[in-house]
Amino acid sequence: MRSLFVAAFTLLALPAAAFEPTGNAVADAFLRTLDGLEFGSATAGAVSRADGATVLEEVAGKGADKALTIARVRIEDGTVNADNALSAAAIDYDGLKIFDAAGKETGNVEAIALTDVRLAAATDETALTDLLGDFATVSMTGVTATSVDDETLTIEALNFVRTGRDTPDVSAITVVVDGLKFDLTLFGEPTESQIRNLGYEALKVYIKAAGAWSSADGRVVIEPSALSVAEMGTLKVEGAANGLTQAAFDALENANVEYPRLMELMGSVTVDGLTLSFLDNGLTDRLMDNLGKSAGADRATLVAQLTAALEAQVAAIGDAAFTRSVTGAVRQFLSEPGEMTVVAAPAQQISAFQIFSAAMLNPAVLPELLSLQISAD
């Protein structure tokens, strides 16, 4: 989620000037890090020590076209290595604010709490997220970002936990975002108008995601995760796959990867299973009402038309039983929205190559190959 922090404040690196030393090694290492970002001439109004922590008050830095202030920085058990890199058991930021060249506030975070932090010494390639550094956990509250067009994004709370940070080839994360709210203008047209036509003036999002990945053997596990939008619904996902190694990702990123190599990669990537579901919380009724008004049709007629169109598409697969299952579940969900679930639970691991080949050559075997099931409750 560090990338979300970057996107929210849309900050670019700028040249830095010299910071103002305080005489405290930990405080100076922190100001040096700040100075190495886009905010030069970093200063602290006061520095003190209390309960094993270094506390900086009224921290400020100014870059070529923006400025930053932090009301209070608390660094617990801070140490500085020979490269002037700062490590700490915990770092807390209170009242972090960012301003543009005209002095307009563009970013505000009420509080940030980091544990097991390592801040790198300044380099030529830096960004504001270096204030977060390499951490085990981070919690943020009261995040607000404002664009040049006065579009706003707010987050009530964000929590990120990473385990196995120092374990070779294995990483696991848990991310929880509460109350991510943003203006519909961020979507642009025609999406903005389409969402407004459904009766939404803003979107409020909640996210809970967890998973693990081994870069060596390519094992990926998506633990039960969910993305909820207030008054719309909740999308849930969980599953597992194998063979997605770092080497495989590196090869797939190569736009010139040769076809034989691509087929080899597809043969090495296998799927254990995948479950997707959507729990409705008002979106389906709004969509159906909107479509009904546009088509001049009542709900029952509209459901019949939509399921008939879907049946024609699914029937092309050639599996009559699967077609009946899909259309029956969709008909029920559109008539009485609840939860729609799609499960792929193959009896044994299925390779991406097998799935691709079946889709191209004999789609009728896909439902059985993947043990596909669709239901509505």
Image (tube, helix red, strand yellow):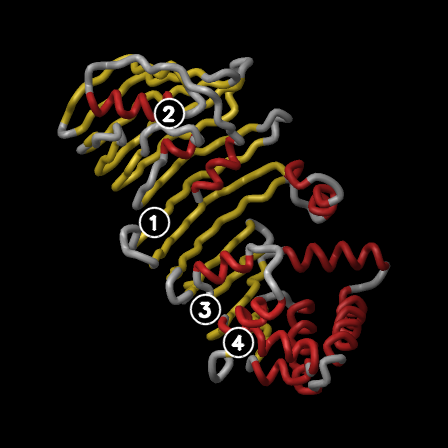
Answer with mark 3 or mark 4, whichever residue precedes in sequence: 3
Real-space Cα separation, disc 4 to disc 1, in angstroms: 31 Å
Please tell me which residue lies in front, 140 or 282: 140
Give the amino acid type for the residue marked by disc 2 in the picture: Gly
Q: Secondary structure at mark 2?
A: strand
Give the image quarter of residue 282: bottom right
**Label 3 Cα crowd, 10 Å radius (few <14 / some 14-19 / many 20+):** many
Q: Which residue is mark 1?
A: 161
Residue 371 lies, in percent from the top left, at: 55, 82
Give the amino acid type for the residue marked by disc 4 in the picture: Ser
Give the amino acid type for the residue marked by disc 1 in the picture: Val
Which labelled disc corresponds to residue 95? Answer: 2
State left or right for residue 327 relative to residue 157. Answer: right
Which labelled disc corresponds to residue 243? Answer: 3
Answer with mark 2 or mark 4, whichever residue precedes in sequence: 2
Q: Secondary structure at mark 3?
A: loop
